[in-house]
Image: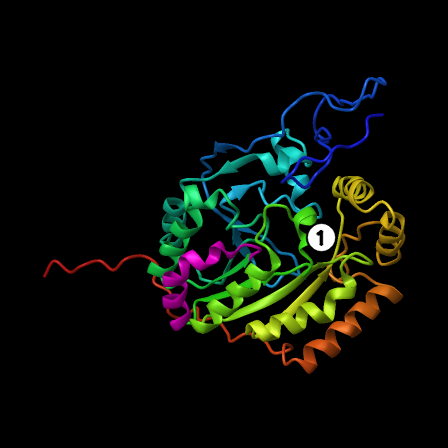
Amino acid sequence: MKTPSHHKGRGAVTNPDGRYNDWRHEAIDDGWGTDDGRPAPQTEVSLEHPRTIIARNQSPDIPFDRSINAYRGCEHGCIYCYARPTHAWLGLSPGLDFETRLTAKPDAATLLRRELQAPGYHPSPIALGANTDPYQPIERRYQITRQVLEILSEHNHPCTITTKSALVERDLDLLTSMAERRLVWVHLSVTTLRPEIARRLEPRASAPHRRLQAVTLLREARIPVSVMVAPVIPVLTDPELEKILEAAAVAGAMSANYMLVRLPLEVSDLFEDWLRTHFPDMAAHVMNRIRDSRGGSTNDPRFGHRMRGEGVFAELIAQRFRIAARRLNLDRPLPPLDCNRFRGQPRQLSLW
């Protein structure tokens, strides 16, 4: 079998066929070398025109019941991303395809306006970034996230944003106005403070220090902001847990949370191939610790278990987080969002 190869600026080192495909390809090394001469994959963006834009969920361990995903796939290329398997629905690979063959939804703002103005709509915070990052690099070109925020602001509709990108600073004008009306929270995800790990783990996401700078800028604008230590990867990044929380507190974060890495479906093999390519000496150790925290598997999909894991190592992470967050005053909740300001259907002007 051909040895996985790494492309600069990309996360996955393989591109397996999607699980719904009718065929499977296998790369073979015939002894003449592993370089097949193909250039590094470039980003391709297709346009999608869905009929609705607000996605609903009933997951009991997720603190929101609706979300908006402006894009399918994510150019950040985070190798651990739990959204990778969703690319199989498009007949594409959860590997390199997920980070190079993307889909944008240019009608998102128009659809959102229509759904917010529908009779009987009841507001509840909408999550941006629940699946793929709303501020991934192609947002600079398409600006769909900004258009969505404009509609939410116009209707006084609350939202939460989760991102690994300092591009969120671009929308400071909108976010400041929304924060004054208690309509927005921002969560910056920080996985590691070490650039040498981050550039391999999350190759096209903002550098760790830039995310922390974004935290500072948002707080200076009085926008509620928290830091998500997500995901915590045993052996590879878990030693940094306390240092990340300390950096978050210095940057001005109001709160913090964490998630233990989970590797659903194809993500498990993709992640292990990535480990053996970049960190071969610790690959077995990392995978064993993940399995120790997931009942012998690399993923536990049960509600109430999938975010935190279980077992001795998972409990140790939970204790370390609780102690550090309490010491740094990061165990406070963010101020509540206000759903009472919502304006749905525009008011009809009287003819008399």
Q: Residues within 10 Å of mark 1 (few under 14, many from 20)?
A: some
**Viewer-nearest residue: 203 or 89:** 203
Q: Is residue 70 left or right of residue 82?
A: left
* Residue lying furthest left: 352
Identify the image quadrant of the C terminus: bottom left
Q: Which residues are magenta?
A: 163-181
For residue 172: magenta? Answer: yes
Image: 84 above or below 39: below
Q: How is the image coloured?
A: rainbow
Task: Give the residue pinned by disc 1.
Answer: 197
| Residue type indicated by callout 1 | Ile
Image: 17 above or below 333: above
Q: Residue at x 55, y 74 (%)?
A: 252
Q: Residue at x 83, y 42 (%)?
A: 276
In terms of image quadrants, where is residue 88? top right
Residue 205's spot in the image, x, y percent?
A: 59, 50
Residue 329's spot in the image, x, y percent?
A: 63, 81
For residue 351: magenta? Answer: no
Residue 229's spot in the image, x, y percent?
A: 67, 63
**Viewer-nearest residue: 344 or 25:** 25
Residue 134's spot in the image, x, y percent?
A: 51, 50
Q: Residue at x 42, y 56 (%)?
A: 170
- The secondary structure that dominates the magenta segment is helix
**Viewer-nearest residue: 30 or 163:** 30
